Amino acid sequence: MKKNYDYLQSLRKVMKDKGIDACIISGTDPHQSELPPHHWRGREWLTGFESENGTNGTVVVTADEALCWTDSRYFIQAEAQLKDTGFKMMKEDGPEAVDLIDWVTEHTNSGQTVGIDGMTFSVAYAQRIQQELNDNGVKLDTDFTPFDIIYPDRPERPKNKLFVHDEKIVGQDVDSKIADVLTQVKEELANAILISALDDVAWTTNLRAAGDINFSPMFVGFLYLDEKGTRVLFIDKEKLTKEVEGHLEKYHITVEPYDSVKDFVAGLPKETRLLLDPEKTARGIYDHVGCTPVFGGDGVAKLKSIKNATMIANLATAMEKDGVALTRFFMMVEKEYPTGKLTEVELGKRLRALRLADKTCVDESFSPILGWNEHGAIVHYEATPETDIAIEGDGLLLVDSGGQYIYGTTDITRTVALGTPTAEQRHDFTLVMKGHIALSNAVYPAGTTGHQLDVLARQFLWKEGKAYYHGTGHGVGYFINCHEGPQNIRLNINPTPLEPGMITSNEPGLYLEGRYGIRCENLVVTEKYETTEFGEFLHFHPMTLFPFDLRLFETEIMSEEEIKWVNDYHKLVRDRLTPLLNDEEAAWLAEKTKELK
């Protein structure tokens, strides 16, 4: 047994001591972060299901069962990492999905108690759990914090220094952003707001930090604003520099200790109508609110999702820089691949070095996914010394990576053939690209949502009885986080419409376990297309600048329009990147973007 089995036994002892019959452990923090700081990654420590990129998982433990729910991106990884830990993987999506709350309800009895740490569950999620349990006479304890007891070497809360994101690059100052936020607050019939989501806090304050969150320049803190002009940043004061203190003073933002946020909301005047986003606010904070809570608050995420003209222009610069780094990377791969000395881990190091050679690139936007052949079928694969394999023989290399440039965040996936691709690989790649192109070419009326477009990317795979289960597209932040809402493109219904200025990924894929994976991803910006008697129509414009592998297209199953799209896109890539390359690099790019016939 792995040492994680001992952690499980320690947890069960604490549960027994505290009168907890079942506990639910999330994989997030008091800000509902997708990738929380290591201080709050206790679920990963407990189970051993982990990676630098983070893993999506929620644990349920009873006296007899230990289960870890995750989504289809992690099925293969979770099965491997949970082996011999005492935990069993449960699927939260796909045809064999089991609902976690239903399972807990069915396996607890009236009079029993379920424990959660309310600071790591959103108000909405905790209320859904509580409603189901209450209907069955089961109590929910929101103050169960076992990691304070069983995790002796728990990392401390991050204390990295903040810095100011140049407002000339951002295109909007803090006063203007706060005014926009408070307009949203007023429209929701509230007069104050507590902002919990770290990307929303960073966006509103034009502040960033390096190191709090892996691969995302956000920082740990809360922000309170009200119509009377009160502006409070709850943060550990060790994180402030003189420059940041001056920035906060300029915008009349006072600083209070991070841990004082509960007492602060408890002491708000009764007449305060405090706007809280129930999906992003911790239940542990909501339980202390002493005024009138108003649920809503997704207006901040909406404001953040729509990039202004300055941001989009600067993101274009980031994409050019990224395209140059990727050109040099894939040139290196082609040159050194025949030696048989390249490995997945080595490629990750090389790619990181090439991106960070540009001083405007602060970090990668996530730990790169470099999967050779069967590893490419693991959607969120992360190469480690234990899993590392050599890049040799014939096959497909899937590279999903990105950079955090001060000019914007990039995220790109390319699947390339090394050696001789098979007819099946070329066919599958082309099916994926047909979906990518169909979504790229979409023209849609204003008010259209991502889930209404999602089928465009899946249709060609579905016709052959093939599928992928992850989303087709996610929003992307502006030098904040790689995954951003509220918009997305996926099968799940999301009422948020796609609007001009939103940056979204387009990344259909196909994964054949034990064989190979394919994913083709560009970032696109929603733009106005035309206005007719039927209203305003929108379309996508590609932002990412790097070619797709010409050797993998099966042109016999492509339409003239699809072939034209590839050629037009490759011309865009060639025109934008060539002036930034040396002669050898430019010649390589010209070959990779020659006309597809």
Image (cartoon, helix red, strand yellow):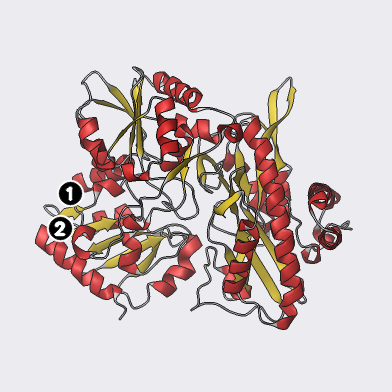
User: Marks 2 and 1, Cα distance to the nearest angstrom?
Assistant: 8 Å
- Residue at the image position 72 percent from the left and 82 percent from the top: 339
Describe the element under mark 2 as helix, strand or loop.
loop
- Residue at the image position 48 percent from the left and 79 percent from the top: 386
Name the foreground residue: 96 vs 6.
6
Residue 351, relative to residue 456: is it above or below? below
* Rendering coords of residue 130 (x, y %): 24, 45
Q: Are marks 2 and 1 in contact (CB under 8 Å)?
A: yes
Number of the label disc, if any, that sits on residue 20:
2
Visible residue check, residue 501: no
* Rendering coords of residue 52 (x, y %): 46, 63
* Rendering coords of residue 275 (x, y %): 34, 27
Q: Which residue is mark 1?
A: 141
Is 176 on the left-hand or right-hand side of 274?
Answer: right
- Residue at the image position 64 percent from the left and 66 percent from the top: 398
Residue that lies at the very extreme toward the front in this rendered image: 242
